[in-house]
Image (cartoon, grey):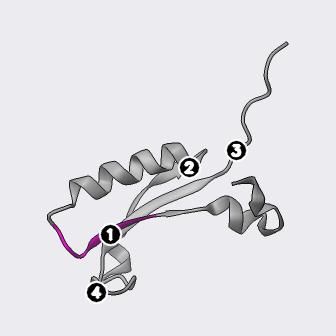
C-alpha cells in the first residue's frame, strides 16, 4: 500500500538589506530577494542557510523563513 504524500506546509524564504542590524525594517522593498516557496521547513531552511551563508560578510543583509501555512490556516498551527 502506497504511503500518502506528506502534508504540504508552505514556507517562504526571502531577504534583503536592513536599515539597521537592530531591527527588521528593509532599506528598499523593491530590492528584496525572494528566494522561493518550499513545501516544508527542512527545504526552506536549506535554502535560507545557503543564502544567509552567501551574505555572511554583509552585516545588514538578513534572510528569513516565513511559515505561510500558519497564515493560511492559523487554527491548525500545531501541525508544525
Locate residue 58 relative to residue 80 in the image: left or right: left
Q: Say few, some or many: other residues with alpha carbon within 10 Å of mark 1 (under 14 / 14 to 19 / 20 or more).
A: many
Label 1, on which residue? 62
Compared with residue 59, is residue 79 higher up or lower down, i.e. above or below? above
Label 2, on which residue? 41
| Mark 2 in CB contact with mark 4 (< 8 angstroms) | no
Q: Residue at x 53, y 52 (%)?
A: 37
Task: Report the front residue among 79 and 37.
Answer: 79
Label 4, on which residue? 19
Label 3, on which residue? 8
Farthest-out residue, top: 1
* Residue 56 location (% of width, % of height): 20, 61
Location of the C terminus by quadrant is bottom right
Locate residue 52 relative to residue 58 in the image: left or right: right
* Among the two numbered marks 3 and 4 on one chain, the one whose residue lies closer to the N terminus: 3
Task: Report the front residue among 39 and 3.
Answer: 3
Locate residue 28 relative to residue 13 in the image: left or right: left
Q: Secondary structure at mark 1?
A: strand
Q: Residue at x 31, y 48 (%)?
A: 50
- Residue 43 is one of the magenta-drawn residues: no
Mark 2 → mark 3, Cα distance in angstroms: 10 Å
| Mark 3 in CB contact with mark 4 (< 8 angstroms) | no
**Among the 4 quarters of the image, the one containing residue 48:** bottom left
Amino acid at each position: 500500500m502506497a504511503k500518502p504524500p506528506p502534508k504540504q506546509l508552505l514556507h517562504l524564504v526571502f531577504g534583503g538589506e536592513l536599515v539597521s542590524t537592530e531591527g527588521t525594517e528593509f532599506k528598499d522593498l523593491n530590492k528584496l530577494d525572494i528566494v522561493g516557496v518550499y513545501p516544508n521547513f527542512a527545504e526552506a531552511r536549506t535554502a535560507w542557510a545557503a543564502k544567509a551563508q552567501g551574505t555572511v560578510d554583509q552585516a545588514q543583509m538578513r534572510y528569513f523563513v516565513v511559515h505561510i501555512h500558519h497564515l493560511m490556516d492559523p487554527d491548525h498551527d500545531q501541525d508544525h
